[in-house]
Structure formats: C-alpha cells, structure tokens
Image (cartoon, rainbow, N blue to C red):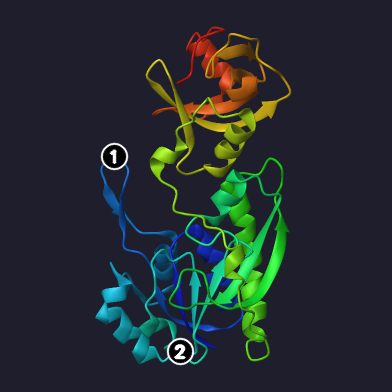
Amino acid sequence: MKIVFFGSPASALPSLKKLLEANHSIDLIITQPDRPSGRGKKLVPCPVKKTALDLKIPYCQPLRIRKDQIALDKIKEIKPDLNVVVAYGQIIPSSIIYLPRYNSLNVHFSLLPKYRGASPVQWALLEGEDKTGITIFELDEKMDEGDILIQEEVNIFSDENAEELESRLAQKGADLLIRTIAQIDKLKHIKQDHSQATYAPKIRKEDGKIDWTENSLSIERKVRAFNPWPSAFTFFKDIRLKIHKGIKIDKQALPGSYPGQILGIKKVGIEVICGEGSVYLIESLQPENRKRMDAYAFSLGAEIKREDMFV
C-alpha cells in the first residue's frame, strides 16, 4: 500500500519501521520542523526526520500544515492509498485527511474515548489508571473523535513511568496498525460514545512543580507521569532538583509537621512529608546541571538535615 506517514517523536518510529518491514511503500514523511535545543539553542531534527534522512525517504516539515500548500501538493502528487498518523503534533486539515483512497488512520495511545488529546500516557498515570491501551481510529476534522477500527487493552505496571509505558504502547500500536491495514476493507467502523470522553491536554513545563500539600500518592503519580518530560521538580536552598524516582510509603507524619519537611534520611532515600500527613520517599534525583544520583548521596553532599524543607 502507498502511504504518507505523519509523525515526529521516538514513539512514532515503531509504526514507521513496521510499515516498511511489511513492504508498504512510504513515499513521503510529514514531520515537525527542527526545534532549538540545548544551551546553544541549535536546531535539532526530531527522531522521525532523522530516520527519514537515514533511510533516504522524502520528507516535508510544514510549520503549519493546515495552511501549507506545498505539503498538500506533495501529497496530491503521490496519490497515496492511506495516510498514517502517529504522534505527529499538529491538527491535519480535511483536505489531507480525506485525500487518500482509505482516508487517514491514527494510532492513539489510549482507549478512546478516554484521554483524547496530546498527552494520553501522562494523564493515564496522573489519574492512577491500572489499564490503558491502543486505539486505531479513522481521523475526522475533530480531535480524536473519529470512528474506532481496532482497540487493544494494556496493563499499566505499578512502578512504570511515562517513558516506559509509552515505549510499550508504541510497540503494541505498531503491531496493531499492521493488523488493521491488512483488514482495512473488512473492519467495522465503531462510533465513539462522546458522553464517555475524557481529555488529556498538553503538559506544560511548569506543571512539573511538586506541590507538597498534595498527598504522597498524587506526588508518586506525578513523578511517574512526568518522567522524562517535563520532569517533576522541587527546590532545596535554591537548588532545582528533578525527582526521577520515588514511592509513597506507609508512614504518617507527626502532628505539627509541614508539607515539604524532611522526616527522615536513610540509605534508601529521603522521606518527605506531604499533604494529609502522608510521606513520600525520594529514591533518586538530579540537581540542576549535574547527573542523576541516589537521593541519599545528594543528602550527604548537600548536608541535608531532618526538618529541612523542600519547596
């Protein structure tokens, strides 16, 4: 099948590679423009563009695909049988959605209609779900509201972070995509129940700031959901700390203690008082401009004492 592939981050790569392995013809890749990165703000291509370059597949990087005539003309020239969209990052206009013979399929990392939007993996973890999944659906003009073709449920592991979960979903989604295309003429289109829809809006960098007045379970979920980006973070004496790993523990703070206050320092990590008197154990962290380390090692170097505060 002749396909135009839309995708940008690493989570789109398994689907792209599976399509090629299945001998589908990827005649064009549409991906996001290069973005500034690092201290020097050097323009860096996204993972899908890097793969396009490596495999010598033609690509296009429209700034705004809804208004980009060049991208539309390139797709028209190809006359694709199908558009495949995986974590592209822009809203695709109807002039492109309905252009191919089989229209456009999207690989979405949730069980629609739950968690429509840009950040379904992060929001599933924030909400404490024990299951999520993959939905292959047909795009329409509205956000993640098209007819469902195939779904597959996936268990969420208790200590899994967003990067780990998204990696598993990306692999399963790629396999499900190939199955979907193989049956595309036979699959029943299932309308979504819009009354059951929930939303997963885009995560902002500032959302990672830990509020220690929240209970330890909420903080544990935030640390998992925001790893690796934007990362959950806090401050100790003006030092910005990324919290990479931790867990709520079965312990209660004494009356008169404050959220953010350090309850104990042990080799397993730093115990921090949270809302409702609950306690969160920081196991590993990363001071700004330094490498990731065990929380206990940081406590020694920073001379952290019991009753010091994270803010």
Q: Vertically, is 177 above or below 120?
A: below
Residue name at image x 44 percent, y 66 percent:
88
- In the structure shown, which secondary structural element does the residue marked by tag 2 occupy? loop
Residue name at image x 61 percent, y 63 percent:
196
User: Of 73 and 301, which appears nearest the observer?
Assistant: 73
Amino acid type at mark 2 = Pro
Amino acid type at mark 1 = Arg
Quadrant assignment, res 191: bottom right
Residue name at image x 66 percent, y 61 percent:
133
Quadrant assignment, res 273: top right
Quadrant assignment, res 94: bottom left
Residue 166, x across and y down, in percent: 59, 55
* Separation of marks 2 and 1 at Cα, in angstroms: 42 Å
Looking at the rendered structure, which numbered label has been put on residue 100? 2
Q: Give the residue number, with chain letter if any, for mark 1.
A: 39
Residue name at image x 58 percent, y 78 percent:
147
User: Of 220 and 229, which appears nearest the observer?
Assistant: 220
Looking at the rendered structure, which numbered label has been put on residue 209? none
Label 1: how many Cα within 10 Å (few below 14, some 14–19, many 20+): few
Label 2: how many Cα within 10 Å (few below 14, some 14–19, many 20+): many
Residue 56, x across and y down, in percent: 40, 74
Residue 90, x across and y down, in percent: 38, 66
